[in-house]
Amino acid sequence: MRRPAVVSAPAMFGRLPDQRDYVRWRVGAEEGRIWQDWLNRQTWVGSGRHIVLPGGQTTDEERDGWMHLSPRGEHDMPAPEHHPLPWSFVMSPGFLPMGGTTDWLTGVLMASRDSVGRPWPLVIYQRCGREWLDESLQETQGWLYWLARLAAQHITPDTMRRGRLTEQVDQLWAMWQPGPWWAQWLRGLRRTSQRSRELTGLPDEAPVVELPGVRYLPWPGWPGKTLGQARPGQGWFWQQNSEGRYVDALRLVEK
């Protein structure tokens, strides 16, 4: 018998432009402390490494886990100083000291700031089993893709959605959460992707489309083989433009 997909409801920790203090949504004190400690050390979030612009790879970049996703010379334009694309991620058990020995972490991570301008990241995450990851990551424009697009709308300075992020995350999750086979069938009939597009409301002509990307992530056998052979303490991070193509990719190992 097939094992049911296991995944928790989304939780959130970090800063938002409409809040003066940390946002904690479904996050206990200990989990908040763990995220705060880890995020304080992630200076690459929002640094604009834009590895796809231009192509090629240096020795230093090889050492820190960055991988270029397009060949040298494909794009002649300079990399922009900043773009609002969040990072989607998957963390194997042990990457962060939370959850059980079989709990994976997945979600989106982005540069943000609070209402007085202090920069600090925001993370929306879930605990899950690998079976659910194997299923959900098959779609390049699935749950994480739409969650990232929704989150990007709430961290821009001129956002009109302030105070509604948790509500809209729950609405989006209701469209994508796992269920029995007939619920998955109904999902297709109800055009979940189109409904997700309407909820996120990001215009197709938004500037993020100008960042070129590629169709595949650079990890062989992604997601099934890569995650199936993963060791504890590994993390995979990637950015997608609004067309669903991959812009940046990064693999980290927590010691």
Image (cartoon, rainbow, N blue to C red):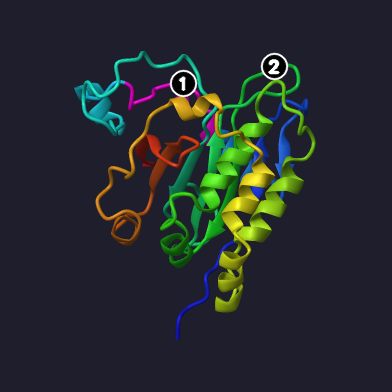
Report if residue 50 lies within the magenta region: yes
| Magenta stretch in the rendered image | 38-53
Report if residue 29 lies within the magenta region: no
The residue located at (66%, 39%) in the rendering is: 201
Label for residue 186? none
Question: In the displayed structure, does residue 195 sit left or right of residue 88?
Answer: right
Which SS class for mark 2? loop
Please name the residue that numbered disc 1 is placed on. Answer: 47
Q: Residue 116 falls in which quadrant of the image?
A: top right
The residue located at (65%, 28%) in the rendering is: 155
The image shows a total of numbered marks equal to 2
The residue located at (33%, 22%) in the rendering is: 53
Question: In the displayed structure, does residue 95 sit left or right of residue 117?
Answer: left
Q: What's the amino acid at mark 2?
A: Gly
Question: In the displayed structure, does residue 248 sit left or right of residue 7?
Answer: left
Q: What's the amino acid at mark 1?
A: Ser
Which SS class for mark 1? loop
User: Residue 211, percent across and down?
Assistant: 42, 26
- Cα separation, mark 1 vs mark 2, equals 17 Å
Q: Which quadrant holds the N terminus?
A: bottom left
Please name the residue that numbered disc 2 is placed on. Answer: 117
User: Residue 89, percent across and down?
Assistant: 46, 44
Instruction: Please indicate, yes or no, whether residue 38 appears anywhere in the rendered image.
Output: yes
For residue 19, above or below residue 4: above
For residue 142, above or below residue 65: below
The chief SS type of the magenta part is: loop
